[in-house]
Image (cartoon, grey):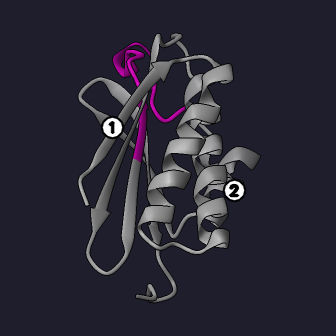
Amino acid sequence: MADVTVSVPAKPEFVHVLRSVVASVAARASFTFDEIDDLRLAVDEACAQLLAFPPPATTLELRIAFGDAGTIEVVASTDADAGAAIWPPEGAERTLTWQVLSALADEARFESAGARPGLRIIKHRETAPTT
């Protein structure tokens, strides 16, 4: 399967587009309903974390890649300048948003792509796809 990249305006009202895209991609990769729902919620939490980061961003981007053995790797990022403030924000890993995100994903971590703040989410498919 080919990787997928989607960009939307960095506004909360566009996050539903990213949730829908990740759900569609995960469904095509034979993830279960529960796994798809976890990914949708994880994307929602990652976007909430990114949209709360100053300075404000204009674009929110989601990159979805496929790994070996039924793994989806999602990187959510914005075009905010991470050099203008500390990324991740101090105490970010103690927030409820981070706790929820960590519980939904098999792996989650803060990262910077250049000067862009981002969050990487990895979800493994627990069940083998049926053919």
At 28% from the left and 68% from the top, the residue drawn is 67
Q: Nearer the viewer, residue 62 or 109?
A: 62
- The residue identified by callout 2 is 99
What is the three-letter code of the residue carrying label 2?
Gln
Residue positioned most to the right: 96
Mark 2 in CB contact with mark 1 (< 8 angstroms): no
Judge whether residue 64 is colored magenta: no
At 57% from the left and 57% from the top, the residue drawn is 39
Q: Nearer the viewer, residue 76 or 4?
A: 4
Side of 49 relative to 97 (left or right)? left
Q: Nearer the viewer, residue 46 or 16?
A: 16
- The secondary element bearing badge 1 is classed as strand
Judge whether residue 78 is colored magenta: yes
One can see residue 95 in this view: no
**Magenta stretch in the rendered image:** 75-89
Seen in the picture, residue 76 relative to 68 is either above or below; the reply is above
- The residue identified by callout 1 is 5
> How far across and down, in percent of the image, does residue 61 sit?
41, 30
Q: Residues within 10 Å of mark 1 (few under 14, many from 20)?
A: some
At 45% from the left and 88% from the top, the residue drawn is 130
Q: The C terminus is located in which quarter?
A: bottom left
Say which of marks 2 and 1 sits in front.
Answer: 1
One can see residue 43 in this view: yes
Side of 117 relative to 65 (left or right)? right
Seen in the picture, residue 4 relative to 90 is either above or below; the reply is below
What is the three-letter code of the residue carrying label 1?
Thr
Q: The N terminus is located in which quarter?
A: bottom left
At 61% from the left and 49% from the top, the residue drawn is 93
> How far across and down, in percent of the image, does residue 92 sit?
61, 41
How far is the residue under mark 2 from the one under mark 1? 26 Å
Q: Earlier in the sequence, mark 2 or mark 1?
A: 1
Name the mark on residue 51. Answer: none
